[in-house]
Amino acid sequence: MTENQNRLNKSDCDVILRNPHISSMTDDVLYHLSLSSGSYDLQQMFGDIKFVCMGGTPKRMESFANFIQKELNIKLPTGTVLDDISKRSYRYSMYKIGPVLSISHGMGIPSLSIMLHEVIKLMYHAKCKDVIFIRLGTCGGIGLPGGTLVITESVVDGLLRPYLETHVLGKTIKRPAVLDKELAEELMDVGKEQLPDYNIVMGKTMCTYDFYEGQGRLDGAFCDYNEQDKLMHLEVLRKEGVTNIEMESLAFAAMCSYAGIKGAVVCVTLLNRLHGDQVSVPKSKLEEWQHRPQELAAAFIKKRLNLV
Ligand code: R2B
Ligand code: URA
């Protein structure tokens, strides 16, 4: 099926749903979001979404929801608080604040990919147009101090390959992990202008399937290499231009790109991996750093909405 056949009528939606089965389903259960197309008017509920912001933990995405609500000056009915739309799933948490959806994706590619399948379908059912997806995350820096904001320019896997390799019907398939360059540059410009006190860089993000051995740490339950092996490996990564390591960007970039959605990844470094492995920053500092990607996203959204 061609891209044009899959792309809905432009006036309806511009997400590419590469699945011919969905349009004939009378009820599509978005099980992990606790929503369904048969029981809810998804277009009425979500049709105005323009920005889907996601991050690992339910708490962080709740705090982003509250933050963006204040930043966009969106009033809630007196005496009410933001509601977690997906609370009945006990999997992800999701908040809608005007044109912004704030949603958690858990840790790692499998968790993110389940959520993205359902959110991409949600965009399709809701007939959303011109939606931008942004991952707001944490990472380990390569030669960058803690607190640095890294806007991902390109993504590679643990073998430095720029695509997501996944298994479908017993076959290995490869999907290019591509992010929108112009969006990344726009985020960089907004960051330089609005957040001049923060160290902000654009770089190559390595996405791994594990936090410990997968990222060459010496402090996992297993370690069959020594410190010199680890440092040599990190040095190879640094020479290849890798600026940071995290665990979701590969699937995020591959899935956004395959669905025709502009995607960006903004992560804050929690440590410089050339200096250590343990994340041991004090809680208050950690919270302050984790807020930085949210501040950049808020500044970007306000600019796009002509609120600054
Ligand atoms: C960054 O932090 C998490 C691991 O601690 C993981 O979700 C990631 O990408
Ligand atoms: N998240 C990661 O995946 N790696 C780090 O080193 C820190 C946060």
Image (cartoon, grey):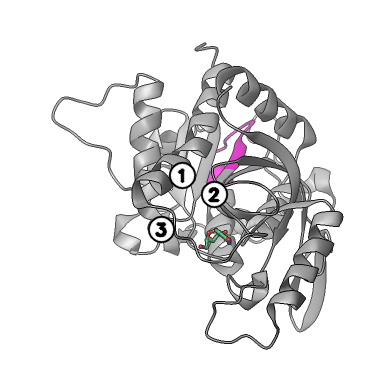
Some atom of ligand 1 lies within 8 Å of the CB belonging to the residue at label 3: no
Q: Which residues are the magenta region? A: 122-134
- Please name the residue shown 54% across and 30% down the image: 296
Asked if one can make out residue 119 in the rendered structure from this viewpoint, the answer is yes
Some atom of ligand 1 lies within 8 Å of the CB belonging to the residue at label 2: yes
Using the rendered view, name the quadrant where residue 211 is placed.
bottom right
Counting from the top left corner in percent of width and height, residue 284 is at 35, 45
Is the N terminus in the top left, top right, bottom left or bottom right quadrant? Answer: bottom right
What SS does tag 1 mark? helix
Closest to the observer: 6 or 306?
A: 306
Q: Name the residue under label 1.
A: 290
Q: Mark 2 points at which residue?
A: 137
Q: Mark 3 points at which residue?
A: 92
> Looking at the image, is mark 2 or mark 1 earlier in the sequence?
2
**Real-space Cα distance between discs 3 and 1?**
19 Å
Ligand 2: quadrant of the figure: bottom right
Closest to the observer: 220 or 25?
A: 220
**Real-space Cα distance between discs 2 and 1?**
8 Å
Q: Do the residues labelled 3 and 2 touch (CB within 8 Å)?
A: no
* Three-letter code, disc 2: Gly
Counting from the top left corner in percent of width and height, residue 46 is at 45, 37
Asked if one can make out residue 48 in the rendered structure from this viewpoint, the answer is no
Left or right: where does residue 70 sit relative to residue 126?
A: left
- Please name the residue shown 37% across and 58% down the image: 34
